[in-house]
Image: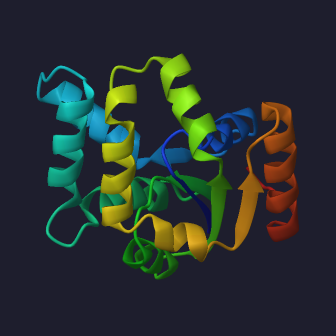
Amino acid sequence: MTIFVIVGMPASGKNIARIYAESKNIPYYATGDVVRGEVKKRGLEPNAENTAGVSTELRDIDGMGVTRKALSLAVDKKSPLVFLEGMRSWPEIELIRSKATCIVVAFITPKSMRLNRIISRGRTDDSPDAFEERDMREIAYGTAIPIALADEYILNTGSMKDALTGLEKIIGNHVVRLDC
């Protein structure tokens, strides 16, 4: 099994990897989906504050609780190729590497572009007013380390098509033949 781990700061364009995976019928699991699912399960309003609180709680004492849930889903799928998104620390990457071949792909986007994306996408769990606070929380989780130590990078400052093309090239460089 090969797992492509997608990392990046909020609104850096990680969802482009989901679009790619879905277009190729490759399983895709995101820690954010796990968190949003738990917010819904608890009957909480899906706002930035509740989502952040549940995220912090689910990360557990060692910070890897949500990753364990997403990794378990991925491994249980028994697909030769899977995408995981939302890892925020190097121990999470090491956990994944203990279970499968792992290639870390970081999406890099300037702060001003990320803020504009948050404003324009209007998700209930996003808040332009809490943008700086969210960035600092992500950094406190350890997000900068997987980004800095990634195996591959996508500078996501152009079109979605440019980013998809870049991702496809990265996948092609690491996977000779997709059996998905």
User: Compared to 40, does 18 lie above or below?
Assistant: below
Closest to the observer, 70 or 73: 70
Image quarter of residue 175: bottom right
Quarter of the image for residue 101 reads bottom right
Residue occupying the point 78% across, 55% down? 179
Residue plotted at (45% across, 46% down): 30
Q: Is residue 97 left or right of residue 48?
A: right
Q: Is residue 109 visible?
A: yes
Which quadrant of the figure has residue 178?
bottom right
Taking 75 as reference, is 124 left or right? Answer: left
Residue 73, x across and y down, in percent: 41, 53
Can residue 127 be seen?
no
On screen, residue 176 versus residue 156, left or right, reads right
Which quadrant is the N terminus positioned in? bottom right
Residue sitting at x 30%, y 33%? 36
Q: Report the front residue among 160 and 19.
A: 160
Vertical comparison of 156 with 78: above or below: above
Q: Position of residue 153 (x, y in %)?
A: 73, 62
Of residues 4 and 121, the one nearer the viewer is 121
